[in-house]
Image: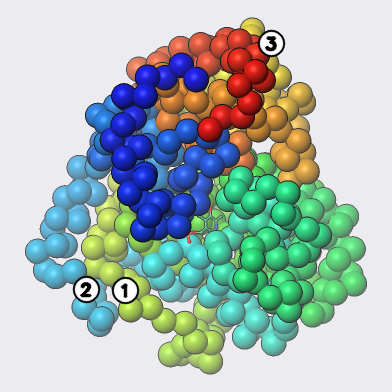
Amino acid sequence: MTQTPSKTSQSEALFARARTVTPGGVNSPVRAFKSVGGTPRFIREAHGAYLTDADGTRYIDYIGSWGPMILGHDHPAVREAISDALQYGTSFGAPGEREVQLAELVTRLTGAGKVRFTSSGTEATMSALRLARGFTGRKLIVKFRGNYHGHADGLLVEAGSGLMTNMDGQLGESAPSSAGVPEEYASLTLVSEYNDPAALDTLMAERGTDVAAVIFEPVVGNAGVLIPTPEFLAALHRVQAVGALLIADEVMTGFRLSLNGATGLLGLKPDLTCWGKIIGGGLPVGAYGGRSDVMDFVSPQGPVYQAGTLSGNPLAMAAGLATLRALEADAGIYDGLESYTSQLAGGLKTLAAEAGVPISVNQIGSMLTPFFVDAPHGTVRNYAQAARSDTATFGRWFQELLARGIYWAPSQFESIFVSASHTPTELDATLEAARAAFGSLKTTSLASTQEGVTP
Ligand SMILES: *Cc1c(COP(=O)(O)O)cnc(C)c1O
């Protein structure tokens, strides 16, 4: 590699310290750069569209904390809302007005009857499934290969990016995709193929009356971006006819693809929806909600237990409220995000073609993945097609971008996230870096064959 080591010495030192006290040196696996190689950058601060690492290097950020930072980092309205809330104490363990305000806003924007807040997306999906089982009295759930719904035991089956990235080759047919998940749990999770309506129809015809819920990413971000076909969406809605609940996992897409997420954009009619990421504006919040008759099964109203010491935390509610209010107040915001991201997509297609590098771009709203695979744009539709990507070439492209100040997602199987702070200046700088990165792939591919794999 050609980067000067001195540019990352602080991150290297922090990573070495971190590895002695934390597994792999990180608190969430994809942060470790395992699939792309090199030293993960330890981030010191983030403002607008930029991250600054521990060595003082600035990057244009396309992670957005993996989705929450749709307004950009350190947004004034969000910062002010958090500072204001801070004056009144940080946690009460008793209800407060902000929880009511955020629940009113979320139900108004999404059409959900009732909503319950948690502290993460994982808790939201886990709780929604318990609720579906409690409501229907059935045991089985159905999910789709390559969809990720957080790390609850029953959901770590054929489960998306972190696992595609970090546990390569250890995935098995309908087997748990993590050690520590008993086969008995995994056996209650049936897996079907994304964008395959016939497979879902067949599965539901055979097992449908035992299925409590079908959970899905309405636009997949966690295998890289995969966009659902109208036929698949229609098949999803047919599961409701056999009494299974349809659960839209909008943890990533909620408030990102529209004010009513993918549900609004694609006209979905789920029974329950899970949220996370943007709903907390950069603080830890998740939520699940939907039909009031179903939500009334949740404790203390109903028999399905679910709780949280920090659920509805006042600082987190304040950040979520400020974020959703800013999104609602700016009528052009989603068009602006779409425009930036489609220009980025168009630029990448052109530059890759000019450099003779085969890629297949999927983009919707402010979500985008360039799969390093030889297929027409927009045709990567499921896990198997995404998994054909040349991850080694992606890794080199990622490193070339990073060396030029562009912080892309450090895995082939992730979406990038554009924020409202990204302007034409960042777009031009990104495309200039991408041109150089594509151009250098031929030379570095020679070099890296000689040197072996990236450290
Ligand atoms: C991020 C994500 C989750 C998990 O949320 P956490 O807050 O990380 O627990 C669940 N579902 C989807 C679709 C996600 O993108």
Q: Disc 2 on helix, strand or loop?
A: loop
Colour logic: rainbow
* Residue 107 location (% of width, % of height): 43, 65
Dot 2: within a 10 Å radius of its alpha carbon, few (fewer than 14), some, or many (20 or more) residues? some
- Write down the residue under mark 3: 356
Which of 243 and 305 lies nearest the eye of the viewer?
A: 305
Dot 1: within a 10 Å radius of its alpha carbon, few (fewer than 14), some, or many (20 or more) residues? some
Q: Distance between the residues labelled 2 and 3?
A: 55 Å
Q: Which residue is depicted at the point 70% across and 30% down?
A: 390
Assess whether mark 1 and mark 2 are in contact (beta carbons under 8 angstroms). yes
Q: Disc 1 on helix, strand or loop?
A: loop
Disc with the residue nearer the chain's start (1 vs 3)? 1
Q: Look at label 1 and name its amino acid.
A: Leu
Question: As displayed, is residue 219 above or below residue 268?
Answer: above
Q: How far apart are marks 2 and 1 (CA)?
A: 7 Å
Q: Residue 91 carries which label?
A: 2
329 sits to left or right of 196 = left
Q: Look at label 3 and name its amino acid.
A: Gly
123 sits to left or right of 64 = right
* Residue 402 location (% of width, % of height): 44, 25
Question: As displayed, is residue 142 above or below residue 26?
Answer: below
Q: How far apart are marks 1 and 3 (CA)?
A: 51 Å
Ligand 1 has an atom within 8 Å of the beta carbon of the residue at disc 2:
no
* Residue 194 location (% of width, % of height): 75, 51
Disc with the residue nearer the chain's start (2 vs 3)? 2
Which of labels 1 and 3 is toward the front? 3
- Write down the residue under mark 1: 310
* Residue 333 location (% of width, % of height): 39, 36
Q: Look at label 2 and name its amino acid.
A: Ser
299 sits to left or right of 386 = left
Q: Which residue is depicted at the point 71% across and 19% down?
A: 358
Which of 32 and 94 lies nearest the eye of the viewer?
A: 32
